[in-house]
Image (tube, rainbow, N blue to C red):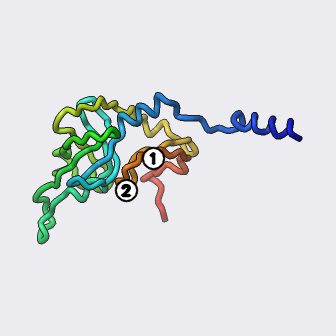
């Protein structure tokens, strides 16, 4: 019986489709993914998408930074938006001007935003390579990483892409 159990436990890793992300990928994640702060309050996650300091995030993460007129709902200002690296360095950012004006409806509707660092960080960041949506299929293994709800600890999760959304298929 002992031999059968030992063989079973030896085969489990071979039977599993799960693979580690590896130390190099984790290092890239740690140098790419940042926590977003609004007036020094944690709000969510972003990641570097360009070597010039562009950070992609979701619109809902930075929505609380918009200061609006209570009567017209027009934009009258912005709160301070910062990014925090895993090592604790904090750098001020700004929102891409286009997304404050003409691009606001798309940014809101598709839940995205682009931030730009205002001063060069001391932390050596890395840009995450973004793939093509057309290369992803239903059932593909995917990873997500970030600071959900602005928490201090970075999380990495693995899952399966259940369905790719298509605007051409009616819901009802």
Left or right side of 47 for 101: left
The quarter of the displayed image where residue 78 is located: bottom left
- The residue that appears at 46% across and 34% down in the rendered structure is 26
Most extreme residue toward the right is 1
Q: Is residue 68 left or right of residue 37?
A: left
Q: Residue at x 53, y 45 (%)?
A: 158
| Residue located beneath label 1 in the image | 155
Of all residues shown, which one is farthest toward the bottom? 71
Q: CA gap, disc 1 to disc 2?
A: 11 Å
Crowding at dot 2, Cα within 10 Å, few <14 / some 14-19 / many 20+, comes out as few
Q: Quadrant of the N terminus?
A: top right
Q: Is residue 26 above or below residue 163?
A: above
Left or right, 147 with respect to 1, comes to left
Label 2: which residue?
149
Q: Position of residue 41 (x, y in %)?
A: 26, 55
Which is more N-terminal, label 2 or label 1? Answer: 2
Label 1 secondary element: strand
Q: Classify 10 Å Cα crowding around label 1: few (below 14), some (14-19), many (20 and above).
A: few
x 23%, y 46%: residue: 82
In the rendering, at what x and y percent does residue 58 appear?
32, 50
């Amino acid at each position: 019986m002992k031999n059968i159990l030992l063989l079973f436990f030896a085969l489990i890793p071979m039977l599993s489709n799960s693979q580690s992300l590896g130390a190099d990928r984790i290092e890239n994640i740690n140098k790419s993914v940042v926590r977003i702060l609004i007036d020094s309050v944690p709000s969510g996650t972003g990641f570097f998408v360009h070597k010039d300091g562009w950070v992609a995030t979701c619109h809902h993460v930075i929505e609380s930074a918009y200061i609006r007129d209570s009567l017209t709902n027009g934009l009258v200002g912005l709160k301070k938006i910062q990014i925090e690296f895993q090592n604790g360095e904090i750098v001020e950012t700004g929102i891409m001007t286009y997304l404050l004006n003409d691009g606001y409806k798309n940014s809101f509707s598709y839940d995205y935003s682009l931030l730009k660092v205002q001063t060069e960080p001391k932390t050596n960041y890395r840009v995450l390579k973004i793939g093509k949506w057309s290369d992803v299929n239903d059932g593909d293994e995917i990873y997500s990483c970030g600071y959900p709800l602005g928490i201090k600890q970075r999380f990495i999760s693995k899952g399966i892409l259940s369905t790719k959304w298509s605007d051409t298929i009616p819901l009802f």
